[in-house]
Amino acid sequence: MNSVPADPGWRARWHARGHRWRHLMRHSLKWRLVIVFMLLTLAMTGVFVFGMTKMLASGWRSYARPLVVDYADKLAAEIGTPPSIDRARAIVARLPVTLQIDGPQVHYDSHPDRHRRRVDADAQAHQGGEAWGGLVRTTADGHRISFGLVGPLHDERPRRLGWITLALLIGLTLLAYAEVRRMLRPLQQIGEGAARFGAGDFSRPIARLRRDELGDLADRVNAMASSLQGMLDAKRALLLAISHELRSPLTRARVNAELVAEGEHKHALLRDLSEMRDLIADLLESERLAVGHAALQTERTDLAALARDVVAAQFAQAALTLELDGTLPPLQVDPVRLKLLLRNLIDNALRHSAGASRAPIVTLGIEPDGRIALGVRDFGPGVRDEQLQHLAEPFYRPDSARTRASGGVGLGLHLCKLVAQAHRGELRIRRAEPGLDVTLLLGP
């Protein structure tokens, strides 16, 4: 009967281990190098053993065997016909050989135990008198003289030497792998540095550990990062300068617009000026948040109370549903930036859910992985799958004409993403069928 494992989850664990091993083999250059070195070692050992075996066999057939056969003929002649046991004993005492004589008159075995173990196999393999490599001779009176070498039939020394040789080859391969790993160690630091630079952290350059091609590569990546940092700093400085400079003429233009006679043109002008003001404010805030966590001014904050304050202060007349978990402990966050995030999410949900069957929902709770989730879900038409990944990009509008007419400038979700990243969190955007669900996830 087949035994059933006591643990029903063994198959799942075995599958998980196999998956981790396959993932390791696909993504770990170090382990692939180990396997390549081991296969190379085994292949070299196999080729070496095969070549040595063929070489020794060829040498035995060409040189040693004729000499041994000729010497065996001389020893058989020395024993005489009929064979002399005294002469056989003298040969055994003089040479490291064994002798076995079988015939009608003489029976002699210099090493009975040794011959008993091997004669059956040799007799079956070599019918016709040429057993043991041609060291069997038959005399004229019918006696069979078998020669052999002193020592055990299955000598363990060559086998031990073979294993020792294999172990040495594996050891040398591991040493070579360790050296290659040491040589490639700068690649890990270059990869970590490239990841930091890609995330916008240029504060720590890649250390040059070697004076070879990898060291030159680290210097080139550092130079590229320095150039990128310079371009980004110049872009930010220019954007900040332009935004600051635009504030004064924009304020004067708004004051002058207030002097225009009441009517449709005045309201359109004030609306355009308000949109420009919001755009400048968002641009300035996005550049401040570009430095990440350093831009925050954190304090212990009750997120449920914060959400209620935002709704009461700016969306008191809007149709909103609140689903807030008031039992959550306060978090160390920047309340001003979180209010900005929540305000943008609610404004975005209200703008895109006009005429929907249900009002947007503001939620606060705990995810299954333990993270705090603060989000807004609307029940509007939503977006297509190909647009989903672009929603947090600056100035991206899924429907340019409709969004511009409704007052959006395409920076709301981008600012929310920057706020999430500054808090070392994540802004998750997903389709809700119907509508869109945008959630800030803060780690425990």
Image: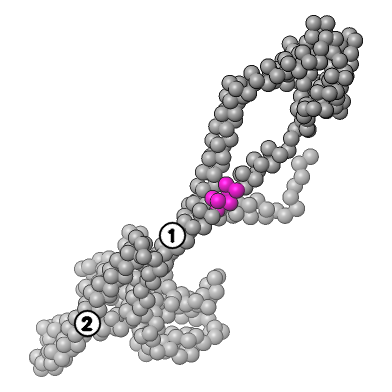
Residue 378 is a magenta residue: no
What is the distance, in whole Å, between disc 1 and disc 2 at their CAs?
A: 39 Å
Residue lying at 13% horizontally and 89% vertically, measured from the top left: 249
| Residue neighbourhood size for the residue with mark 1, other residues' Cα within 10 Å, grouped as few (<14), some (14–19), many (≥20) | few
Secondary structure, mark 2, is: helix
Q: Does residue 182 appear to the left or right of 203 in the view shown?
A: right
x and y, in percent, of residue 201 in the image: 36, 75
x and y, in percent, of residue 212 in the image: 36, 62
Judging depth in this view, the residue of 220 and 323 nearest the camera is: 220
Secondary structure, mark 1, is: helix
Residue corresponding to mark 2: 237
Residue lying at 54% horizontally and 35% vertically, measured from the top left: 47
Q: Is residue 1 above or below residue 143?
A: below
Residue type at mark 2: give it.
Ala
Tally the marks. Answer: 2
Residue type at mark 1: give it.
Leu
Segment colored magenta: 168-174
Q: Nearer the viewer, mark 1 or mark 2?
A: 1
x and y, in percent, of residue 131 in the image: 73, 18
Q: Quadrant of the N terminus?
A: top right
Quarter assignment of residue 252:
bottom left
x and y, in percent, of residue 286 in the image: 29, 80
Residue corresponding to mark 1: 184
